[in-house]
Amino acid sequence: MSGKYFCFGDFEFTCGVNISMGTCEMLSVGLIICDERFRIAESFYCTARPVKYPKMTKQCVKLTKLDQQEIFNSPDSNSVLLIVRRLMKKYGCDKLYVWGNFDRPGLFSDAGMHRRLKKDPENIQAVAKSIEDIQRRLVKRLGLPEAVNIAELSSVFGFVPRQGTYHNALNDAMGLYEIYRGAYGTDCKNNKKLRALIDDRIAKREERRLKAAERRREIALSVTLSDEERVYLDSFGEKRDEALERLLELRYPIINFMKNHPDEDEYELIVFDEPLRFKLSSGSAYTPDKGQSAIVVMTMTKSSFGRAVVDYMKMHEREAVLTAE
């Protein structure tokens, strides 16, 4: 055997009520191994029986479409991943490429479950250490503004599972292989479906940005401007609207913080220099050490924070003048 081989994989884990990142266990693994010309050399799929909680939750069954009896009858994940290690060694693959940042910690969680039950986790740990998340790399290469799921992205390169659905470990591994092949083995810049997906995601991201900005503005204006703030804004004359936007940017985190700590009587605006920035603290949680390196600590209430807002805005003005000089 000669040449370089790539190993693409996906794992399914237990999920649902009372199962977290630190307590999930492997349910299945799928692998696709190909050469430099993207010719598939080998594929592998196997289910695994969790050592701690082999009975799947309703949410887990719905998501993975796995059969409970098949899971009960499956080998332990450490035995399954011994096969994975041997396949990777056979083809000289020291990296197992995955899509997203869940598989590695998921396997380490499974290894932890094995250790707690005094079972061997060697192969689980070894495979976990070989995992490399290539999502960000592929997103950048394909020109996407953000990550999308395997199903949506692999479909632009013509992949549709022959059997079953996505959230099947082998289908998702095959989907990742198709994405990688599309990114590095095709003229993806002229892929019309990919271009349409990029345009759609750019539009959706902009829509979310505008909605978030509008929501922040609503919160910033949810408390009537104080007399101090109005006088300060009026001093800008024709540039009052520009000053208002800057003031609202400061008002938003302060008002939002107060809304999240409604039972407090006082709040602290802790201002630091170089660069000018601030932190917020509730009065009951504030201690002198929090303001130890601050240039000023301003005490505020729900009805009197306008003065602090104006004082901080003036500090910003002075800093801007000094920077310009």
Image: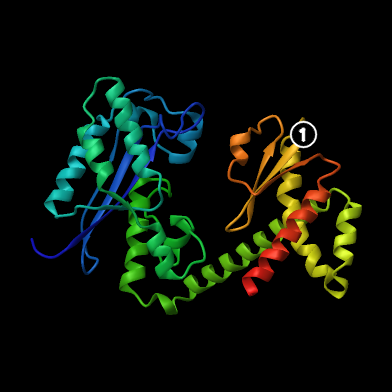
* Disc 1 secondary structure class: loop
- Residue drawn at (47%, 40%) of the image: 63
Where is residue 159 drawn, in percent x and y?
39, 62
What kind of residue is marked 1? Pro
Residue positioned most to the left: 1
Q: Nearer the viewer, residue 125 or 292?
A: 292
User: Where the N terminus falls, by quadrant?
Assistant: bottom left
Q: Nearer the viewer, residue 37 or 92?
A: 92
Q: Nearer the viewer, residue 104 or 4?
A: 104
- Residue drawn at (21%, 36%) of the image: 123
In the rendered image, which residue does mark 1 sit on?
262
Q: Is residue 120 above or below residue 260?
A: above
- Color theme of the render: rainbow
Q: Is residue 215 visible?
A: no
User: Where the C terminus falls, by quadrant?
Assistant: bottom right
Q: Nearer the viewer, residue 102 or 267?
A: 267
Q: Is residue 56 visible?
A: yes
Is residue 120 shown left or right of residue 284? left
